[in-house]
């Protein structure tokens, strides 16, 4: 069992894992509370899509620029600042909701603010993992544990959130989230990190952004991985935005039902994370991406056709596992391939691919659901995800020719061993 959590041997990563784990539970409580609040106030599928769009569109615009700054600035300090700002954003939601004066317009504005914060926080956090783990051999395990932390909180958070909404209302959910940020802030402050001299770069921000963009565009494995996760993020993930509609209109439930659905998806993701953490090598993760994409597509098709809670709870773990496995596997391969001086920029483009594309999907899903209903919208996205998985499967042989020399150079593969990435 020890090999499943070997990245926790590193003190800084252990601190981060504990603090971030507490904070993410609060984040998921806020996510479910925000969705339920908007749907309770408006009853509109379209506005659910608009709120999802508002919270994530800043990443699509700002994350590439933030990636350049992440490569220039101290990533640890960036994270401290972003966590403090996130706590203040949740506190603002709590104050407005507890006073009973919150409006959808204010929710949208605060979602945009959080999206701006996340545009810097997410690439900084992804790139900072390397600095917390002294032994690079433990990097894949650290990335897998990050996913387990995210998805473990995804099980606990919505369950708590559903109960809290029913018992106390959305405002207390936001308040708990604001308090939970204290844990991750304290963990960051407690870290012992070597002094790193600030990088002085003669090139301008636009030039460094262009360099990162050309690298992503011209290197086939990186380009294909980002396109794959972007397609799934755009076409598949919006099912989560429409979850309140499914819980209330299709399954005829309330906030507790919504919490169960989110928990089922998170449970599947956690199982998938345990599998990734058990792996000893990045070799073969390309095949994992193909299988995971097929699995989540089949799961979404079944979920879109389900009309009872039991069936939905059975198929959602497949969706959660597939979503997590394809995104985390792509992250691991990217972190293995990319050079250190480009890490922040590549992780920024990864952030755009995974999260920045979701607002487009959320908005389109909201509009489509308003016209053809949430189940048919989810079904259409699932079929498109299946096509994306087939496309990536057809690319794998050619991509292996580019990946193998790098794996040999970095000691991941011996010269004569074939890679299946």
Image (cartoon, grey):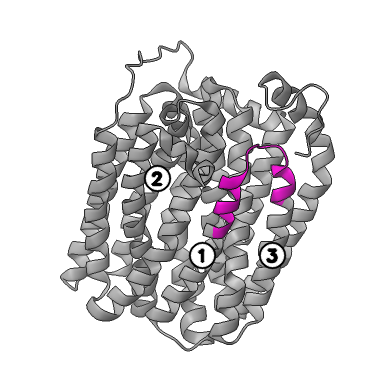
Q: Is residue 291 magenta?
A: no
**Mark 3 packing: few (<14 Cα in 10 Å), some, or many (20+)?**
many
Q: Residue furthest left?
A: 99
Which residue was labeled with disc 1? 267
Ranked by sequence position, the earlier of labels 1 and 3 is: 1
Tag nearer the camera, 2 or 3: 3
Mark 1 is surrounded, within 10 Å at the Cα level, by few (under 14), some (14 to 19) or many (20 or more) other residues, namely: many
- The answer to whether one can see residue 56 in this image is no
Classify residue 81 as left or right of residue 370. Answer: left
Numbered disc 3: secondary structure: helix
CB under 8 Å between discs 2 and 1 = no
Q: Which mark is residue 297?
A: 3
Q: Earlier in the sequence, mark 2 or mark 3?
A: 2
At horizontal 38% and vertical 44% (from top left) the residue drawn is 17
Q: CA distance from mark 2 to mark 3?
A: 27 Å
Tell me the SS state at disc 1.
helix
Q: Position of residue 345 (x, y in %)?
A: 52, 30
Q: Which mark is residue 118?
A: 2
**Which class describes the residues within 10 Å of circle 2: few (<14), some (14-19), or many (20+)?**
many
Residue 90 in the image, given as x and y percentages of width and height: 26, 56
Question: How far across and how far down the image is residue 91, in percent?
Answer: 21, 56
Separation of marks 1 and 3 at Cα, in angstroms:
17 Å
Task: Give the prevailing secondary structure in the magenta stretch.
Answer: helix
First in sequence: mark 2 vs mark 1: 2
Question: Is residue 62 positioned above or below 53 on the image?
Answer: above
Query: Residue at position x 29%, y 48% from top?
Result: 86
178 relative to 406 in the view: left or right: left
Above or below for 127 versus 384: above
Closer to the observer: label 1 or label 3? 1
Q: Which residues are magenta?
A: 271-289
Out of 162 and 209, give the one closest to the viewer: 162
């Amino acid at each position: 069992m020890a090999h499943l959590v070997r990245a926790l041997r590193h003190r800084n990563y252990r601190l981060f894992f504990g603090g971030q784990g507490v904070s993410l539970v609060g984040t998921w409580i806020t996510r479910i509370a925000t969705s339920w609040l908007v749907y309770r106030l408006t009853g509109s599928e379209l506005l659910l899509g608009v709120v999802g769009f508002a919270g994530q569109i800043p990443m699509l615009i700002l994350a590439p620029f933030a990636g350049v700054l992440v490569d220039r600035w101290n990533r640890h300090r960036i994270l401290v600042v972003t966590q403090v700002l996130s706590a203040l954003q949740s506190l603002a939601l709590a104050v407005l909701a507890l006073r009973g004066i919150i409006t959808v317009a204010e929710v949208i504005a605060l979602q945009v603010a959080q999206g701006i914060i996340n545009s810097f926080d997410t690439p900084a956090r992804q790139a900072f993992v390397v600095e917390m783990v002294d032994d690079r051999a433990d990097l894949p395990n650290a990335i897998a544990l990050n996913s387990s932390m995210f998805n473990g909180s995804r099980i606990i958070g919505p369950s708590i959130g559903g109960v809290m909404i029913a018992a106390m209302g959305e405002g207390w959910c936001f308040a708990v989230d604001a308090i939970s940020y204290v844990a991750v802030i304290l963990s960051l402050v407690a870290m012992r990190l070597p002094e790193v001299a600030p990088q002085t770069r003669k090139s301008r921000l636009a030039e460094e952004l262009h360099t990162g963009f050309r690298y992503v565009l011209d290197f086939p494995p990186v380009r294909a991985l980002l396109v794959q996760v972007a397609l799934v993020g755009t076409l598949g993930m919006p099912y989560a935005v429409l979850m309140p509609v499914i819980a209330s209109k299709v399954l005829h439930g309330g906030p507790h039902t919504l919490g169960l659905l989110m928990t089922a998806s998170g449970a599947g993701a956690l199982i998938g994370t345990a599998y990734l953490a058990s792996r000893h090598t990045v070799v073969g993760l390309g095949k994992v991406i193909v299988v995971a994409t097929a699995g989540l597509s089949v799961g979404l098709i079944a979920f879109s056709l389900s009309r009872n809670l039991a069936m939905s709870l059975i198929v959602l773990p497949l969706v959660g596992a597939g979503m997590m496995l394809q995104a985390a596997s792509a992250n691991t391969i990217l972190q293995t391939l990319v050079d250190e001086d480009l890490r922040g920029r590549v992780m920024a483009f990864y952030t755009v691919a995974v999260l920045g594309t979701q607002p487009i999907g959320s908005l389109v899903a909201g509009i489509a659901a308003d016209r053809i209903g949430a189940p048919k919208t989810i079904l259409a996205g699932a079929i498109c995800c299946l096509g994306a998985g087939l496309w990536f499967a057809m690319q794998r042989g050619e991509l292996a020719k580019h990946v193998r020399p790098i794996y040999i150079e970095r000691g991941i593969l011996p010269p004569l061993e074939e890679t299946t990435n």
